[in-house]
Amino acid sequence: MTRIHFYQVTGRLESALSLIPRLADKALRRHLDVLVHSDDTHRAALADRQLAGSGLPLSAVSVSCDGEPGQHYGLLINLADTVPDWFSRFERLVEIVYDDSTIVLTRRQNYRFYRDRGYPLHYHDLSQSN
């Protein structure tokens, strides 16, 4: 069953994006491939730039906003406003919560979606460490 992790960060989109290379690095060390999924081309492009400058082996990390998971099964970092239909194929899923009222609302909806279906939920408050 997919393990769902919510990360709370202080700041706007840039704060959320700066967390992506750290999460991807941790997943790669656990031999998990990584998919960063967005439904917004601007967010996807910004995430891609963050990863490109991180020094991570990009062969195991993909950024997508076409709505398809490809051959990924390890870690899904969901930057989309909704839960992708295929999320349960992943071992782990990350949702990042940051200081944007729309994001807070959608992440709460996503949290309820996962909770109501019995997925194990984990919350990490990084807002105090920023």
Image (cartoon, rainbow, N blue to C red):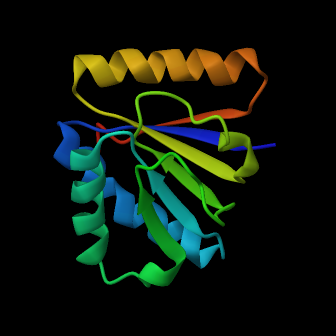
Any part of residue 30 in sight: yes
Q: Where is residue 38, by image quadrant?
A: top left
Residue pictured at 51% horizontal, 45% vertical: 67
Residue pictured at 41% horizontal, 36% vertical: 80
Residue pictured at 36% horizontal, 42% vertical: 126
Any part of residue 130 in sight: no
Q: Is residue 94 left or right of residue 47?
A: right
Q: Is residue 14 left or right of residue 26?
A: left
Q: Is residue 67 left or right of residue 120?
A: left
Q: Is residue 129 above or below residue 36?
A: above
Q: Which quadrant, please, contains the N terminus? A: top right
Q: What is the number of callouts on the image? A: 0
Residues 130 and 8: in front is 8
Residues 116 and 126: in front is 116
| Residue 74: x %, y % from top left | 66, 62
Q: Is residue 75 above or below residue 107?
A: below
Q: Where is residue 99, by image quadrant?
A: top left
Residue pictured at 57% horizontal, 40% vertical: 5
| Residue 63: x %, y % from top left | 41, 61
| Residue 114: x %, y % from top left | 66, 24
| Residue 6: x %, y % from top left | 50, 36
Residues 39 and 23: in front is 39
Q: Is residue 69 left or right of residue 8?
A: right
